[in-house]
């Protein structure tokens, strides 16, 4: 006597990418590790799309909330009036850089 099979398709095994966090079927992922490893990390086969998703999640510069001027300062924190100039002056004078000289 033959047993009847369920006609419904089985769900594909999936994993979450360790970099970008997307969940995809294992056929679209690459394992990192092997039988000797206690855990296997999975990464997207499409490295370019994974990188775009991963870098889109990184915090952008300038998204830190400003500190109010009357907030108490921590022990190693710089006061806004003592913050060094972001672009220091050039320590080497232009005439010493080896450029073309006019001789008198």
Image (tube, rainbow, N blue to C red):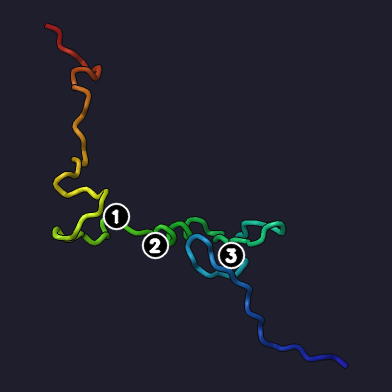
**Residue with the most extreme right position:** 1
Name the image quarter holding the C terminus. Answer: top left
Name the image quarter holding the N terminus. Answer: bottom right
Q: Secondary structure at mark 3?
A: helix
In primary-sequence order, the first of circles 2 and 3 is 3
Q: CA distance from mark 3 to mark 1?
A: 32 Å
Q: Nearer the viewer, mark 3 or mark 1?
A: 1
- Rendered location of residue 4, percent (x, y): 78, 91
Circle 1 residue: 61
**Residue with the most extreme bottom position:** 1
Identify which residue is drawn at 19% across, 22% down. 94
Mark 1 and mark 2 residues within 8 Å of each other at the beta carbon: no
Q: CA distance from mark 2 to mark 3?
A: 21 Å
Identify which residue is drawn at 49% across, 60% down. 19
Q: Secondary structure at mark 2?
A: helix
Q: Quadrant of residue 68?
A: bottom left
Circle 2 residue: 57
Mark 2 and mark 3 residues within 8 Å of each other at the beta carbon: no
Circle 3 residue: 28
Which residue occupies the foreground of this view, 11 or 65? 65
């Amino acid at each position: 006597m033959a047993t009847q099979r369920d006609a419904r398709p089985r769900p594909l095994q999936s994993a979450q990418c360790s970099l970008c966090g997307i969940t995809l079927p294992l056929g679209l992922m690459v394992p990192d590790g092997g039988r000797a490893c206690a855990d296997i990390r999975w990464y997207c086969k499409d490295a370019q799309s994974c990188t775009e998703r991963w870098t889109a999640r990184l915090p952008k510069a300038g998204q830190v909330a400003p500190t109010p001027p009357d907030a108490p300062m921590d022990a190693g924190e710089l006061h806004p009036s003592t913050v060094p100039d972001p672009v220091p002056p050039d320590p080497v004078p232009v005439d010493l850089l080896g450029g073309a000289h006019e001789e008198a």
